[in-house]
Image (cartoon, helix red, strand yellow):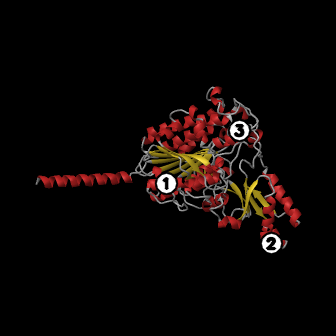
Amino acid sequence: MKKIFLLSLLSTTLSFQAQKSDDETLKKPKLVVGIVVDQMKTEYLYRFVNDFSETGFKRLMREGYTFHNMHYNYMPTFTGPGHASIYTGTTPAVHGIVGNEWFNKALGKDVYCTDDASVSTIGDGTEAEGKMSPKLLQASTITDELRLATNFKGKVFGLSVKDRGAILPAGHFANGAFWYSKTGSFVSSTFYGGALPAWVTKFNSEKNYEKYIAQGWGLLKDKSVYNESLPDDNPYEGKLNKKQAFFPYNLAEMSAAGDASILRSSPYGNNLLADFAMKTIENEQLGKDDETDFLTVSFSSTDYIGHTFGPRSIELQDTYLRLDQTLAAFIQYLDLNVGKGNYLLFLTADHAGAENVTHLKDNKYDVDNVNEKNIENAISEFTKAQFGDNLLLNYSAFNVFLDKAKIKEKGLELAKVKQAVKEFLYTQKQVKRVYDESEIIAGSVADPYLNFVSKGYDPIQNGELIIVDKPAYMQYQGTGTSHGSPYSYDTHVPCLFYGWGIKKGESYDKKEITQIAPTLAQKLKITFPNGTDAKVMTEVLTK
């Protein structure tokens, strides 16, 4: 009898342990927080590490999992495609966001990545600021799949200073997406409803942006701290609001009446967004029930500042030291209000950024800035000389669009015109490769440049030819920096996972940005976004 009792007890214990194990396996985080830092190079985690606090970036790296070798796997490396690729787990060739704005040859006009003429602004913004939605995004996002998996009970909100940084991550089924208006308010569009939530209207009425503009932008720390950067007011940086290129900045004097745009180009755009994110969690009760919620937060001020001042400026370093403090406060808020261990957070970037070309040239690297207008004019003049007429319809974002109607009208063969233009472009100093649409669609794993172009190309929308410039060349102005190339300085971005179900660790194996969304899907045990090839990062799938 005693033996039977012990066997029964053992069986019950094993059954309980198995059930417990199953429960733990099925358990999900209360909240997922996706953070994208616009134009962040992985290098900044290392270059500024001695000046970071212990509770911001360093906490995420110390207590979470760091992927040191995360890259974009397509070109163009721009903001719109970057956000779309992170959250869909696929590339522009599939999700359709092939730029921030581009000439769409099927429509014969320029389009913006979140254009939607059928919707209107809600909130205190201009008419144009709210004519936005995810309508042009062709693939589902991880946030969409969460909504579907929870029968729309799990809530999704997207927040950013930029409209595209809020809209594309939030996907097609979001409860809301909010972005910053030049009026100083957060606005949305009628795609998400007929009016702003009352709490957003209240937040806007408090004019929280004013306190940041009023305090101006001086250095966070003693000037000696910024020895990782070039001297202030160096020849490679532009001017804030086209007025000033050195500290301190009087933001109030730089602001026109009724225009609070200056906040975007200061570190305080990140502060205001974090304030708004915490209010979103509080008022929308994110992470407060049994269904997983998802908050996407895109810090965009880093991109505005990077474009203006460049990657070696004191302004950029100061921005990251301030962002570190902002992250620390936000993480502490999540610990207190969602619960440490109850939320899963990841941080990455939508692209990185190049070194300033003039700085490289002054240090004996034979490279140049390339004026996009000059490329356009050169192609136009070549076709006039070769074929008796300007056969260029549009040149933008590395895309050459030929005037097919005019080519047909003149009785010319499109293939011969493409080949002639291609051969001409190879005479230009900055050009590394030129591909035509048939080559791009066919693809080739043996050609790494073509592989990048193919993954970023949509034959319905993109041009007949795509240009890849040589390394370090930039189609940009002389000061500050830009991005868009397939080179590591534009593709190499941070990737940090932290919180629920994440073990401590690090990896130096190369990863692709399109692995984030399917990894999250596996982690949450929901359907993959519909365009992804479902390659996952196994390092963060088990603890």
- Give the spatial CA distance, label 3 vs label 2: 46 Å
Label drawn at residue 413: 2
Return the residue found at the far bottom.
411
> x, y (%) of residue 338?
44, 42
Say which amino acid is labelled 3: Phe
Residue at image mark 1: 519
Say which amino acid is labelled 2: Glu
Question: Marks 2 and 3: in contact by CB < 8 Å?
Answer: no
Residue positioned 85% across, 71% down in the render:
410
> x, y (%) of residue 498?
48, 44
> x, y (%) of residue 267?
63, 37
Could you classify mark 1 by the number of other residues whose Cα lies within 10 Å: few (under 14), some (14-19), or many (20 or more)? many
Q: Earlier in the sequence, mark 3 or mark 1?
A: 3
> x, y (%) of residue 373?
80, 52
Residue at image mark 3: 309
Q: Is any atom of residue 193 visible in this view?
A: no
250, above or below 29, in the image: above
Task: Identify which residue, 174 or 240, lies in the foreground.
Answer: 240
Return the residue found at the far left.
1
Task: Identify which residue, 7 or 209, lies in the foreground.
Answer: 7
Tell me: 428 left or right of 315: right
Say which amino acid is labelled 1: Thr
Residue 272 occupies which quadrant of the picture? top right
Residue 317 occupies which quadrant of the picture? top right
